[in-house]
Image (cartoon, grey):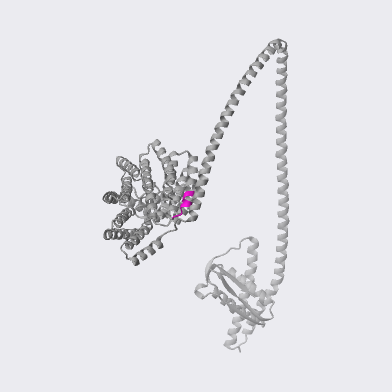
Amino acid sequence: MNLCNYSVLLLIVLSGYFSFSAEKIDLKTCDSLENILKDTIKSGQLPPVQRIDIFLELSKNYLSVSPEKALLFCRQAFFLSKQINSSDQTIIACQYLGKIYSLLGNHNASIEYFREAITYSRESDDKENIVILKDEISKEYILKGQYAVALENLYSAQEIAAETGNDELCARIFNNLGVLYCNLKNYDKSLQFLNRALTIYTLINNKQAIANTMTNMGNVFRQSGNLEIALQYTQQAIDIYKKIENIEGQAIAYNSAGQLYKQWKKYNLAEEFYYNSLVLKKKLGIQSAIVMSLISFAELNIETHQYRKAGQYLEQALNMALKENLTREIITIYYYYAELYNSINDYKKAFDSYKLYNTYKDSVYNEENSRRIIELQTSYEILEKEKENELLRNSNRLKELQIAREQNLRNIILLIMILILFVLFYIYNRFRIKKKASEELSTKNEEIARINKDLQTLNDQLEEIVEIRTQELVKEIDIRKQTEKELISAKEKAEEANILKNNFLANISHEIRTPMNGIIGFIDLLKDENLTPGQQNEYMEIISNSSNYLLTIINDLIDISKIEAGQLSIRKEAFSLNKLLDNLLIFYKSKIEFLKKQVIVFCYYHLPEKESILISDSVRLRQVLTNLLDNALKFTEKGEITFGYEKLNENSLTFLAG
């Protein structure tokens, strides 16, 4: 069995990419923080920055025990921090979201949030955080099986880490490069990077990191077949973990030792170390780690032909993985189910298990990844070689320059000494003769310098005055030109408004006479005692419509006065658009009858009565529609006039009249 996925996950754990340990959280503290959030959100007393800090603290505490709950709080922190432009808190939220989505098996989302954190970190030039984020991104690509992209991110992180001068950060990347090359079965390259990491960790005396790296080196030697050397490194790691009381590290090292003894066919010892690892993982209480131990027991029992026990371990592991939604572990479990059923010749179940394995499985390593990895590795080695050659050339050039500089310095010193002696001799002979002349010349030079300085000061002041006055004149000319333009524009607008007003007033007299004649004429007709009630009602209706028409004309005059006085206001209220159009239809039918024109008026709606409620100024809308219909009626002797509205989208209507 290749065990590709399982080995990848195990080595990621060992390398520090992904740790199953978690800080012991105080649930009472979490409850207290949640209560504070509820109270302060209601009262609005807690500032946004402090609210974000509480969201992030809750996310951190719930990260390992309830990723879904951590996601809920972290998303609130993320959106609120972006809303108030708090870049530092946004970076932390993005990092937490990346880790949460990784635990939930959504590696694409995890990568996107880590990349967004890199964007913000670049703005603040936080190179160390960029290295850590690229390291996290490479982990996600490894879990997706895209090793070439993971390697590209690690090499990029290594270059940035070298720029920071942080040795521990460089060692972390070397360690992870070693783990990745081990997964690619390039064991020499893997040990090269792991040794570089171990050297740095030893110099800075980071015991936990030393133990982690030794565990990784033990796995490299185990996979390459050097079991005795692998056991030495693994045992040293266990001793260090015990000394520093690191339960997590002991659990990882015990599991690695179990793998080693299984490969060595020493199954009893393998089972013993697996058991010790499981005990420690249960003590830590992290479900994903417990599931991986159960998978190790199942693998061991498959190899020793104890198929019933293997099935029990796999069933227990699958139940836990499905309950916790552990995608990576589910993939591995179905792979081992296929192996188990294949071993007992139950090929149908083996086939079904393998189908489930492929259903969950992400993309795998392929030839394109191999090509890209070789290209990246070659580029990196060439770059490293060029750097070494450049350093050597610079060192040789520096030595040559230093030798030349020393020779030139000796020659210059000798020449200077000769010149000094010559000058001293010349000064000694000429000193008495030129002393007095030199003093007079010095006095005159000082006076000339003072006069030149005064002249320069006056010249500067004059240039400054001229420049200021020139700027003032330019500003005055610009202001006058602008004022002239504004006056001309205002005059044209006033003349145009005056012409329009005169035209309106000239036409309004005819408009006023029309309804007035109707009112007076039909009032006279009402005096006839022989009128029937129907005729009286008809005349009263015509008088009413004419009065409304006259009132509309008077309102237009008032509106013109308000517009000129700048006092026209808009009153918004809820009204039925359909009812407004119905009233206009009744009014214009009566007006057409009164004017005795052969015109038919139609009105159409687009919305039912309940949906035709608008919030606007119904009076101004009626005035606009009335003016449009008056113009249509004025220039239409026969035919039809249609008015109404259509709905363009959720927020827009278009009115039509003609």
Percent position (x, y) of residue 491? Answer: 72, 58
- Vertical placement of residue 178 versus 604, above or below: above
Asked if residue 647 shows in the view, the reply is yes
Q: Nearer the viewer, residue 390 or 202?
A: 390
Q: Nearer the viewer, residue 612 or 552?
A: 612
Q: Residue at x 61, y 63 (%)?
A: 568
Give percent across and percent down for residue 350: 35, 64
Residue at 43 percent across and 43 percent down: it is 193
Examine the structure image and report whether residue 146 is included in the region drawn in magenta.
Answer: yes
Q: Is residue 80 magenta?
A: no
* Magenta stretch secondary structure, dominant: helix
Q: Which residues are magenta?
A: 145-152
Question: Position of 623 compared to 477: left or right?
Answer: left
Is 197 left, or right, of 419 in this rendering?
A: left
In front of the other: 650 or 274: 274
Residue visible at 61% across and 70% down? Answer: 623
| Percent x, y of residue 598 | 67, 83
9 sits to left or right of 277: right
In what quadrant of the picture does the C terminus appear? bottom right
Q: Quadrant of residue 346?
A: bottom left
Q: Which corner quadrant holds the N terminus? A: bottom left
Vertical position of residue 90 compared to residue 588: above or below: above
